[in-house]
Image: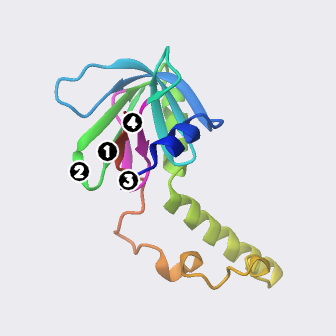
Amino acid sequence: MRYNEKELRALSRQPAEMAAELGMRGPKKGSVAKRRLVKLVVNFLFYFRTDEDEPLGALLLERCRVTQEEPGGFSISFLEDPERKYQFECCSQEQCQEWMEALRRASYEYMRKSLIFYRNEIQKMTGKDPLEQFGISEEARFQLSNLPREGQSARISSQVDELD
C-alpha cells in the first residue's frame, strides 16, 4: 500500500490518542531496543527519534496482532508476514496494558464493527436506523454481512511505511 508522504507527515503532527517514549525494537534480527517517541494517531503508529519532529516511520494498524510479551512489553506483528515483529518496552505493566488496548481499538475494522454494533442497538431501542439521516444506511461497508466470519481475523494488521 502506498501513502502520500506529505499527508503522512501532516497526520503525524495531529493530536495523538496516545504518545509516550517507549523502548522499540524493529523486525531485523539482532536489532536492539532504542528509545523512541511513539504516537498513535487514528490507525497509524508513528515513531520518532526522541529529539526530532519528523517521524522515522509509521505502522498502519490493520490486519496485525498485538501480543503481550514479557512483563511490561508487547509486540505488533502482521498477518501477511508474522516474522515481521516490532517489540515495545513500557515503563510499567499498566502502561503496557493501556497501549495494547488502544492499539487493538485503532483499526478500521474494529471501528466498523463498533459502528455496526451500536447502530443495531440504537435501531432496537428506537426502531429507526441512525444512519438513514445521512443517506448511507444501505452502503455495503455498514452491513453485518460484510463482517469477517468466525475464525477469520479481524484484528489489527499493517503494512509498514518507512518515511524518507
The mark nearer the N terminus, 2 or 4, is 2
- Going by the picture, which residue comes out furthest to the left? 29
The span shown in magenta is: 56-71
Q: Are marks 2 and 3 in contact (CB under 8 Å)?
A: no
Nearer to us: label 2 or label 3: 3
Question: Which sits earlier in the primary sequence, circle 1 or circle 4?
Answer: 1
Callout 4 secondary element: loop
Label 1 crowd bin: few (<14), some (14–19), many (20+), radius 10 Å: many
Tags 1 and 2 in contact by the CB under 8 Å rule? yes
Q: Residue at x 80, y 85 (%)?
A: 127
Q: Which mark is residue 136?
A: none
x, y percent for residue 115: 64, 67
Which three-letter amino acid code belongs to the residue tagged 2?
Asp
Q: 102 or 121: which is nearer to us?
A: 102
In the image, 101: left or right of 17? left
The amino acid marked with disc number 4 is Leu
Instruction: Say which mark, if any, is on residue 77.
Output: 1
Which of the 4 image quadrants contains residue 23?
top left
Q: Measure how far apart labels 1 and 2 are at the Cα level.
A: 7 Å
Judging by the rendered image, the residue that carries numbered circle 3 is 2
Q: Is residue 9 magenta?
A: no
For badge 3, the amino acid type reads Arg
